[in-house]
Image: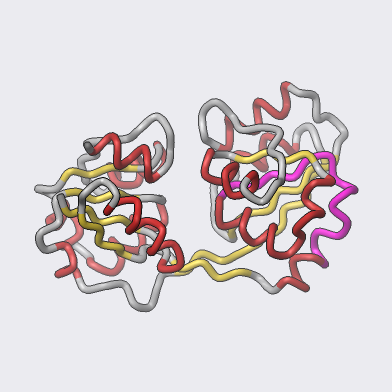
Amino acid sequence: MKIAITRPREKADETIKRVENKGWKAVIIPGVEIIPRAEEEVKKEIGRLEEYHWLILTSASGAEIMLQYFGEELKKVKLAVIGPKTKKVLEEKGVNVDLVPKEYKGENLAEELISRGVDGTKILVARASIGREVLIERLRRHAEINEVVLYDVAQPRDIPDSKIMDGVDAVIFTSSQSVKNLYKAWGEEFGKLLKNKKICAIGPITAGTLRGLGVRVDVMPEEYTVDACLEALR
């Protein structure tokens, strides 16, 4: 089986290995480009990590940037993350994660934090320049929030021509933004290219974006990871 996966170029090698280990062929389509903010800028906006009661990271890319910029200092604050991939990135570097919500969405993370008693505390939310506001909105009612942008999510300048979809049997969309960027790049051809392929969305937000563009979603695993998507497609 030939599977197309929308991933940033810097994550391509890792993803290709996972697909090939299952005996399939991978086609990487860079639907987004991750552009980290300057270390000096990020550190200035954050200040001292130990002043925060909680640090929230919403993506593996954000975790990687925080590890690069702060390293061992991340052990000085309680950490909450939205999904297992982000948790794995941190724990592989010896940084403990205190909270992962049962359902990997911002609103669920907010509710689980609130249930632990965060009223009057100081929380750092470090994330991408684009994202849903529900997490911030819910937490602001209870705690002092410092929202810091770690990286920008841009439309890649080198999105492949739609011919890259020739011979593809299934497509895994790993983010809502990659759906939007490919639709913008391929135009009306987007829906036609996906019509006879198995479509997997990594989570409900991505699935909703696809359906909003008239694309049928065949698979959405309970765990929002590429590995879970591959197993679901199997």
Answer left or right for 1 relative to 70. left
Task: Report the label total.
Answer: 0
Q: Residue at x 32, y 58 (%)?
A: 16
Answer left or right for 59 relative to 166. right
Asked which quadrant contains residue 230, the reply is top left
Q: Residue at x 77, y 50 (%)?
A: 74
Residue furthest out toward the bottom: 157
Q: Is residue 164 magenta?
A: no
Answer left or right for 48 relative to 124. right
Q: Is residue 46 magenta?
A: yes
Residue furthest out toward the top: 115
User: Looking at the image, which is closer to me, 37 or 65?
Assistant: 65
Asked which quadrant contains residue 127, the reply is bottom right
In the depicted structure, whether residue 28 falls above or below residue 119: below
User: Looking at the image, which is closer to me, 148 or 28?
Assistant: 28
Residue 177: percent from left, percent from top: 41, 56
Residue 32: percent from left, percent from top: 42, 64
Asked which quadrant contains residue 187, the reply is bottom left
In this picture, which residue range is highlighted in magenta? 44-59
In the depicted structure, whether residue 104 falls above or below residue 5: above
In the depicted structure, whether residue 115 falls above or below residue 87: above
Residue 30: percent from left, percent from top: 36, 66
Q: Residue at x 70, y 46 (%)?
A: 94
Residue 102: percent from left, percent from top: 55, 26
Quadrant of the frame with the C terminus: top left
Q: How is the image coloured?
A: secondary structure
User: Looking at the image, which is closer to me, 188 or 96?
Assistant: 96
